[in-house]
Amino acid sequence: MSTGDSNSPFERLLLREIQKVIGDAPIGVSLGQKTVKASGDAGVSRLVIRDRKTLARMVLDPEVGFGDAYMEGRLEVDGDLVHFLEATSQIMRSGRGKSWHNRLFGRWLMFAQGNTRDGSARNIHHHYDLSNDFYKLWLDRKMVYTCAYFPAPAATLEQAQDAKLEHVCRKLQLQPGERVVEAGCGWGSLALYMAKHYGVKVQAFNISREQIQYAQAQAKKEGLTGQVEFIQDDYRNISGGFDAFVSVGMLEHVGHEHYAELAEVIGKAIGNTGRGLLHFIGRNRSQPFSTWIRKHIFPGAYAPTLREALEIFERNNYAVLDVENLRLHYAKTLEHWLERYERAVEQVREMFGPEFVRMWRLYLAGSIAGFRVGTLQLFQVVFAGPERREIPWTRTHLYAGEAGIAEEPGWEKEWTPARY
């Protein structure tokens, strides 16, 4: 990096430290009006730092320092934000962005945001109870806030979320009259879909007040209150016997230290003859979740490796029947969310202010980058008790009827769910 004579000795020292973090990443750097070029091709984007104090905070903790400064408007990214974050994702993966301060603060967050019963309630309230009106601005019409499934790249977000609900049901091989328990049901879309299209009875647990109230209202609106019961409670309080267990997007909020509790809950719920599905954000190797994300967006979050998640099944001697990685589907889902979010920015600003707008833009853009480059994965794991004998011979049942999806308008009205 060439700092030039216009920078003070202290600024040159700080910029050299930033250079160590950036390495050969294609990122340019500007301090105030003084342009500094990183080594390598700086053509992707340029980081514009407003002042020396911001630069110093980034040297102390590159990840949190950058995130906080972006959120507060003390730095800008000149160029495509997602592409910039793709480059920095490689930096974080190498470990250069993890300073001693970041590690220390990250460990403190693990303690302060522990997913005990009370802690989980606080953590979930922080994110999911922002307001239903906020999420309605940029989610699909069914308010599905998890990875969609795109049978064809041109599918709309609405089509892809409907396809995801169907994909999950097919994997579970639901039969009319069966009892299903869902842990962490969001705004209720999957529970309602299972009841409506597969004739099952569902108990759905969630500790988000706003989500449960919305789901209960939807069940009443769709005439499904006799089939679906939405319960505002912790997953650890699930009781009774069920044919199937499903959890979509909740494992990230459980915490590795509580996997034994989750395994016990599942074991009691479905015994040795039931089956289930876990859908969760994961990683290729064990490491803490983003410190900045845990600080501002998802307190208590942890994305396990596949090996760590399999511990849950091993405790009950459960068989893993199917594993699918939908990483690129989540990147595409987030692209839709970010596009819709940007269209609603003025409304978001009126609701929460400019810092919130930038904070959530960074969260969504950073998540796209993580799934694109592979620092984040999206796993769906199907499992069954050791005494279950009804196991599919092939995977063809998952894809019947998918041909032509998103090519014909109104496919979601004409495509009938598979039956077993």
Image (tube, rainbow, N blue to C red):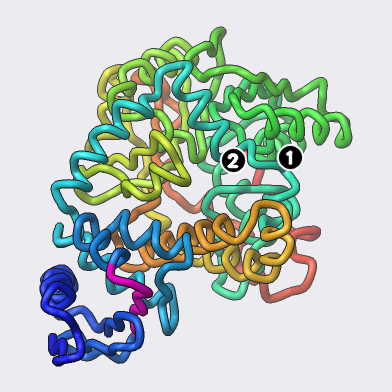
Q: Are marks 1 and 2 in contact (CB under 8 Å)?
A: yes
* Span colored in magenta: 45-52
Q: Amino acid at mark 2?
A: Cys
User: Image check: 16 left or right of 391?
Assistant: left
Residue 14: image location, x then y, percent: 16, 70
State the mark number for residue 159: none
Q: Quadrant of the N terminus?
A: bottom left
Circle 2 residues within 10 Å: few <14, some 14–19, many ≥20: many
In this view, the residue in front, 375 or 239, is: 375
Residue 48: image location, x then y, percent: 36, 79
Look at 22% across and 88% down and name the residue there: 37
Query: Which residue is label 2 attached to?
Result: 169
Look at 42% across and 22% down and name the residue there: 388
What predominant SS class does the magenta segment belong to? strand
Look at 57% across and 31% down and name the residue there: 125
Q: Is residue 107 above or below residue 336?
A: above
Residue 184 is inside the magenta segment: no
In this view, the residue in front, 146 or 369, is: 369
Residue, far top: 240
Label 1 secondary element: helix
Answer whether residue 48 is visible to the viewer in this image: yes
Answer whether residue 328 is visible to the viewer in this image: no
Distance, label 1 to label 2, CA atoms, is 9 Å
